[in-house]
Amino acid sequence: MFLPLVYPEDRPKLIAMIREASEKLTGIELEFRMQHPERGLQWVLMRGSYISPYDRVNASIMGSLIDITERKNFEQQKDEFIGIASHELRTPVTSIKAYAEVLHEIFSEAGNAESAALMGKLDAQVDRLTELIHSLLDTTRVTEGQLQLQKESFNLVALINETVEVMQRTTNSHRLELVHDCEEINVSADRERMRQVLINLISNAIKYSPAADQVIIKSSMDGTDATVCVQDFGVGIAEAVQPKIFERFFRVGEPDIATFPGLGLGLFISEEIVRKHGGTIWVNSRKGEGASFYFKIPVVLQKSPA
């Protein structure tokens, strides 16, 4: 058995995937590290299928191991570059924003409305650039396993309401509708990271439904879990590409969707945030019929009185 050669930190995920394959009779595809007796540490891609035991004992997995060490090394170098570049960009961008705000104020006080409007547009584009830099930094943290959470107890429904209220002010094209099963869902989570997930899902819903005028945000609680759904009525996502939409830098390569701007990082980061909260995120969609993105995280159960 090759399991003892698997890097200790990667064994639990591999074992969990093998168990899932045995329970659901599905295939396996996973990247992990192995300590080769001659070549040292290597990255491999495992692809295989679970083979049912013919005698209820001798179950097995048939597949292949592909050496992807070179590709992984290249990806690591790319991640290091992105991290360094993002950090270096923060200082000049902060300075540009400060100058833009000062000039906007000067032009406004001087009554130069046209110049003030142009500086306002520049300031908005600097904010967009800042968001992209933060996304790149978060991506680096995710790939390095350094995305940290600052958990606190709060009402998830209240956070949803606050986020939707702010985002409604920034869009005139869509009506953001709230549907809550209850007015209080207590969770122990990172408030700002959860807000980041909500903003990403709602922004995507608006962006990918240009011909619609409505986005519905729902919340519910079922036992030990809180579920949030962001539903749009836009272009939808083909079933064939849905398993890939949470991958880093993935963008749908269809003519009517590829024209939308973005780096393909929002869902990748959102999935990691939800996962680190012990939750799951998924999508239900069909091409041309809109999309519903869901995420589920544990709730804080109220203690029964003694």
Image: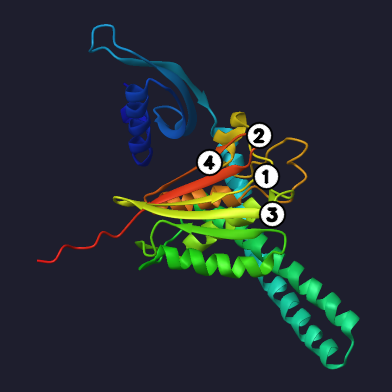
Dot 2: what SS? loop
Q: Callout 3: few (<14), some (14-19), or many (20+) C-alpha neighbours within 10 Å?
A: some
The residue that disc 1 covers is 234
The residue that disc 4 covers is 283
Q: Nearer the viewer, mark 2 or mark 4?
A: 2
Q: Amino acid at mark 3?
A: Asp
Q: Is residue 253 left or right of residue 5?
A: right
Compared with 285, 79 (above or below) is: below
- Label annotation for residue 188: none
Of the residues under marks 3 and 4, which one precedes in the sequence?
3
Marks 1/3: CA–CA distance: 9 Å
The residue that disc 2 covers is 287
Where residue 64 sits: x, y (%)? 47, 18
The residue that disc 3 covers is 213
Dot 4: what SS? strand
Q: Nearer the viewer, mark 1 or mark 3?
A: 3
Q: Amino acid at mark 1?
A: Gly
Q: Residue lying farthest left? A: 306
Marks 2/4: CA–CA distance: 12 Å
Where residue 84 sits: x, y (%)? 63, 59
Dot 3: what SS? loop
